[in-house]
Amino acid sequence: MGVRGRRGQEGAMSPDTPKVAFTGTKATMLATLYARAVQSAAPDPVLADPWAVEAVAALDYDFRRLRTRRTDTVSVAVRARTFDRLALEMLAREPGAAVLHLGCGLDSRALRIGVPPSGAWYDVDYPDVVDLRRRLLPAPEGEYHLLGASLTGSAWLAEVPSERPVAVVAEGVLPYLEEGAVVALLRGIVGRFPQGEAAFDALSRRALRLAALHRTLRATGAALRWGIDDAGELEAAVPGLVFVSAPGIASPADLAKLPWAYRMLVRIPAVRRMARVLCYRFPAVRPSERA
C-alpha cells in the first residue's frame, strides 16, 4: 500500500530502531497506526497524519501480518478524523478543559489538533506503549502529559487535577474492556471532575459477536468484550452521565472512497447502529456527591 516499516526494507537496521512484539489488544494500535499512515500517504487522503507515516517507517515491524485491507485504512482514517472534529468541538465549548485521551496508543491526535492554549492534554495508555510512543512521536507544545497506566486501574486519575472540566476522547478503546471496567472508568471520571463531555465508539452486542471474524482481530489475537445496544444503558449505570447524541461518522465524500458493497451496507439503519460514536456530558456536582 506504499507504506511499510523497516522490516521488509533492504539494508541493515540501526540498533536504535524500535522493535515491537505486541500481541492482542496492544497490537491493534499498530493496525490503526498503519491505516492512518497509508491514508495520509494516499493521493487524496482522508486524514493528514505525517507523524503516522514517520512512525511506521521507523518501526522494526512487518505490518503485513496485520492483514489490513484498503477498506480498513479508509474506515480507520474516517473514524480518526471524526474524533478529531468531536475533540475540537468539545474544546470550542470549553477552551480551558483538560483533554483525557484514553488508550492513546500511537495516535498523533494532540499533534494534529493541538493542545488547547488555556487547557491541558493527557495521553493515557499502558506503560510499555507510552515508552514506545516517547521514542516515536514528539511531544506537542503546551501543557501536555503522558501517563503510563492501565485504564482498568484508578491511580492515573489522581495525576489529573480535578478543578478543570474534561473532554474525554476514547477511540477504538472501550470495546476491548469488560463491561464492569467500562462502567468503573466512567464512574471514576464523572465522580472526579466538576463537569465534562465524553466521546467514544461502541459496538452493538450483535456486532461484538461478528467482530470476532475480522481479519485484523484474528491476526492479533485481540478480543472485543463490551457492547451496548441502547445509549441509555450507560445513563443508568453511571449516575450523572447524560446521553447527548450519536453523530454520524462518514460523510458522503468519505463513503465515496469505499467499495460499492460497503456503501450499500451502511445505508441500512440496522447496520449503522452496529457501530456508533456516542457522545455524553455530565453536569457539575457538589464535592460531597463525588465518588
Image (spheres, helix red, strand yellow):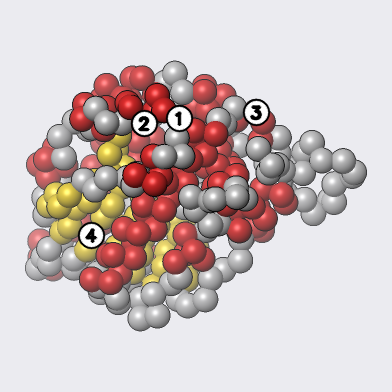
Pinpoint residue 122: horizontal percent, then vertical percent. Answer: 42, 64
In this rendered view, identify the residue nearer to me: 277 or 160. Answer: 277
Task: Identify the element where label 4 is drawn.
Answer: strand
Which of pointers 2 and 4 indicates the residue nearer the eye? 2
Q: Mark 1 is on which residue type?
A: Pro
The single residue placed furthest to the right in the displayed view is 11
The reply to whether residue 204 is visible in this rendering is no
Which residue in the protein does label 4 denote? 197
Which of pointers 1 and 4 indicates the residue nearer the eye? 1
Work out whether 195 lies above or below 8: below
Which residue in the protein does label 3 denote? 65
Q: Mark 4 is on which residue type?
A: Glu
Which of pointers 3 and 2 indicates the residue nearer the eye? 2
Work out whether 263 lies above or below 185: above
Which residue in the protein does label 2 denote? 263
Which residue in the protein does label 1 denote? 259
